[in-house]
Amino acid sequence: MGNLHTDPGTQGSGQDQPYGCSPAGEAEEQGIALRERLHIYEVLNEIACSMLQPSEVVAGACRELGLLFPNFHFSIAVYFPETRLFVVHAQGEETKHVPCEEIIAGYFLQQKDETTLAIEDCEFWVAPPPLNPARGIIKGGFHSGLFAASRIRSNLIGVLSLQRKTPFVWDAREVEMLQTAAAGFGLAYYHAVLCDNLMYSCRTASQQLAEVQEEAIQWQQRAVRLEVAAEVARAVGSCRTTSELLGELRRSLGQRWPQCRIVVQRYIREKDAFEIGPIGTQAEATVRTAQNCLQKLFLNRVPVMQILCNSPQEIAGYRDLDPQLVSECEKEGFRSLCSAPIYQCDGSLWGTLSLLSREPSVCELYADQLAEIGRALVLPIRATELHEGNKSAEC
């Protein structure tokens, strides 16, 4: 370690002053030193109270504290224990990332009880192994340096340094000012890190709370859909024939959504066709081949789970696939539609449910509910088929 001069008679110029000093002179020097320390605390306290990010605290400290040492190169090396790197900041210079073994600041990781290191001439200073500051003051052309550790509860926060390109004898005033700055910087930076971590935790907690609330809303909506689907399933559960089931299904859905037109499409596998319930002015159901029916999308190898159109333009987009449906919608003034599949226990398509509305985007409100109803009809449909099969066997 370099010689550390604390004699009040030794000034920063390195020249000796006459021995002795009057009481008035000592009081004046003590007053100056006190004002300097108070100014340092005021600067760092203002930075700490500004609620800045840790990086902004470092930048502000470099800028403001550097003004207090105009004759020196001032820098702050912040230590990151996770990577064992020092990030060196200096006003007007690029930030450098240096391993702790390659920078003089790493000295304070070895010497945990040391707070200050003064090097008068690096030519005569030997770094304790494994410290090898090849990228330290020598690379920057500096030949002398004063370093002060900034610690919080024995944990190294960073190192503040003053450096010169010529040999220099450091006096007690500079040592005391840098120590004061190091202590204040440690508190300001640690406060910023705590606030940053707290804000991050708050943001994370707020985000997680929002996600939980959103999930709760989704579950609540799903519960409502399941309840409605269960009511429809109970309404058709007493039906004994497919014809009764279709009629009760239209009646139940018609009561629930009177502003919409309810259409039930029954898929006939033997004919590869759909028996489509009345649409618009149609008085009876019609049978149309699946090839010319929009609902054939539910028969794809990778079937769609829902068909939704929120405007006449979207409905018209299916003209090539189902021109008759598009024509009926234009004739009756239907401006939105949605359709959901009804699958049997074996996964084959039993039919579909469709809603048509004369208001745009209305069917989107009921699309998920319609899909839930389609899933809830699996057991009633199976019960009806078993009843019809037993009745046929008896005959």
Image (cartoon, rainbow, N blue to C red):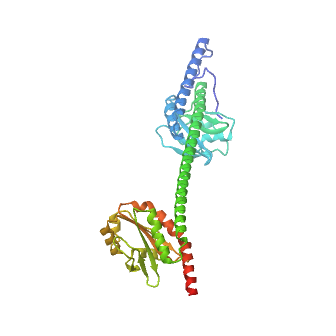
- Residue 53, image x and y in percent? 52, 40
Task: Judge whether residue 169 can be spotted in this image.
Answer: no
- Residue 238, image x and y in percent? 55, 72
Closest to the observer: 387 or 292? 387
386 vs 368, left or right, is right
- Which part of the image, by quadrant, shows the N terminus? top right
- Residue 227, image x and y in percent? 54, 61
Name the image quarter holding residue 226.
Answer: bottom right
Task: Judge whether residue 259 can be spotted in this image.
Answer: yes
Name the image quarter holding residue 76.
Answer: top right
- Residue 384, image x and y in percent? 54, 77
Q: Residue at x 62, y 47 (%)?
A: 84
Q: Residue at x 67, y 44 (%)?
A: 129
Closest to the observer: 282 or 382? 282
Disc tally is: 0
Q: Residue at x 30, y 69 (%)?
A: 331
Instruction: Give the answer, above or below, for where 255 lies relative to 42.
Output: below
Q: Residue at x 39, y 62 (%)?
A: 259
Instruction: Give the answer, above or below, for where 161 lies relative to 392.
Output: above
Closest to the observer: 201 or 176? 201
Closest to the observer: 338 or 1? 338
